[in-house]
Amino acid sequence: MRQLQTPPLKKVDEFYAELQCTISRVNNNDIIVVMGDFNAKIGQMHEDAPGAVGKYGFGQRNERGDRLVSFCCMNELYVANTFFSQTKTNRLDLGGT
């Protein structure tokens, strides 16, 4: 288990490089779970993210969402909460930007 903090926007590249390095060291037989607040809006399913985003994504994807979805595609990961139907009140984090 490794804990990483999502950085300010100008250091996002460094964050994903460190996360990629960590994931690259994981045994192929192990299960990878990446959890946290990435300050990302994933948005709805698009053809550019086969398997990474489910049909229950919401809204428009932002820059950090693009980066997270790209990272998930590259590592064969998926954004789990976009694969399950949720009530409207559970879908949104109104405190975030």
Image (cartoon, rainbow, N blue to C red):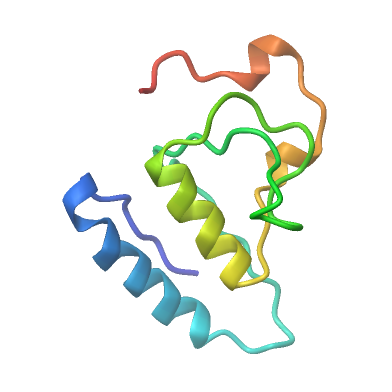
Q: Is residue 77 above or below residue 35?
A: below
Q: Is residue 17 above or below residue 81?
A: below
Q: Closest to the observer: 11 or 3?
A: 11
Q: Closest to the observer: 85 or 59?
A: 59
Please tell me which residue is depicted at 67% across the width and 70% down the height of the picture: 76
Q: Residue 49 placed where, x, y %?
A: 66, 55
Quarter of the view holding residue 85: top right
Q: Which residue is at the far front?
A: 47
Looking at the image, residue 75 sits to the left or right of residue 14; the answer is right
Quarter of the image with the C terminus is: top left
Disc count in the image? 0
Q: Closest to the observer: 72 or 27?
A: 72
Q: Is residue 82 above or below residue 66?
A: above
Please tell me which residue is depicted at 46% across the width and 13% down the height of the picture: 94
Looking at the image, residue 73 sits to the left or right of residue 22; the answer is right
Q: Residue 24 placed where, x, y %?
A: 50, 85
Q: Which residue is at the far left?
A: 10
Please tell me which residue is depicted at 36% across the width and 65% down the height of the picture: 16
Q: Is residue 24 above or below residue 39?
A: below
Looking at the image, residue 13 sits to the left or right of residue 10; the answer is right
Q: Residue 36 placed where, x, y %?
A: 48, 46
Please tell me which residue is depicted at 62% across the width and 62% down the height of the picture: 33
Q: Residue 10 placed where, x, y %?
A: 17, 51
Looking at the image, residue 6 sits to the left or right of residue 59; the answer is left
